[in-house]
Amino acid sequence: MSDHQAQTCRYLNHLGERCHAPSLESEFCYWHDCTVDKSDPDTAEKLEAYARRGGMMHGIFLQHANLENLNLVNHGSSKGFDLTGADLYRANLRGAHLFNIVLIRASLMKTDLSHANLHCAHLEECNLLGVKLHGAKIEHIKTGKTILQESAAKNSQAQEEYKEASDYYEQAEEIYRNLRKTSESQGLFTLAGPYLRKELTMRRYQDPLYSANRLYSKIVDLFCGYGEDPLRVVLFSWVIILASSFFYYLFGLRFAGEYQAFSLQSSLEDNVIFFFECLYYSVVTFTTLGYGDFIPVGFSRLVAALEAFTGSFTLALFVVVFVKKMTR
């Protein structure tokens, strides 16, 4: 090992890049040494200077660090400072300016981000358990499709470690609830909606696989995305209409006193025309218009009764979900 390497930090990031800051006795620099106390009042000022000198920000240890009012906005650049893999456990970041900051795979567990500016922050695969976001600006934050605890829960479930998976799902529910409440408090309902769906989905996964609560929750999710997706209601409506049309097509309807049903003896044209008549009757039944030109017979009566009941419920559900979304 050369003298230069011996005097510089031995930290290597996930890309194989080395930190060139002066090392301490631990062979790590001030920022990558997990044993150094960073609770001094001037820690924020030191970190700002280190970042603007181009210091290696990946994987820095900031546990319990006093970083109140820290300004890590990378002015004049389209990219924010990159703190990928940083450890900010219980750090004080109240009022910090962190616009466009990169905290991918970082730990923000129990970090105090009250009144911090997190606009456009990259928080993918970040540990957000217990993070304090009171008054924090979180517009356009990026948390990815799944958070860290959700991915861990799925991995544990795949390995049949169900107790551990349930614990991770509970943590994920707490995190999504925190993000949802913070979004709602700022009027960011477009952001809050997906977090609400995730929160309720994580709660569902904690129930036993074949329990009534889990089944009911899954049905509500499929029908309307927990009240956040009106298009799901429309899609479900068309599925019911088409499925009912198929049953009417097979079991028959009566029109002008004449019984009609699919028949191999009928021509292709007649069968196609009758299918569209069944589709028309299904729409009329689903919307409970009831013109009376077609009359169900046999098993078609049961299908018509179920479709009419489902249709009246689904139309009311669509109005509720749609109005909820529009009034936001």
Image (spheres, helix red, strand yellow):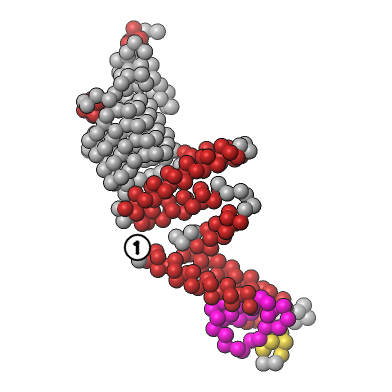
Residue at which label 1 appears: 328
At label 1, which amino acid type do we have? Arg
Q: Nearer the viewer, residue 253 or 163?
A: 163
Residue 18 in view, yes or no: no
Residue placed at 39% from the left, 35% from the top?
A: 109
Q: Check the image and name the residue furthest to the right.
A: 265
Give the side of residue 223 with respect to residue 144, left or right.
Answer: right
Q: Check the image and name the residue furthest to the bottom.
A: 256
Residue placed at 48% from the left, 39% from the top?
A: 149
**Residue 295 included in the magenta stretch of the image:** yes
Read off the magenta span: 278-304
Query: Where residue 273 appears, x then y in whole percent?
Result: 65, 81
Residue placed at 31% from the left, 37% from the top?
A: 112
Mark 1 burial class by Cα count in 10 Å: few <14, some 14-19, many 20+: few
Query: Where residue 19 appears, x then y in whole percent?
Result: 34, 20
Residue 297 in view, yes or no: yes
Give the side of residue 145 with respect to residue 77, left or right.
Answer: right
Choose top left, top right, bottom left or bottom right for residue 219. Answer: bottom right
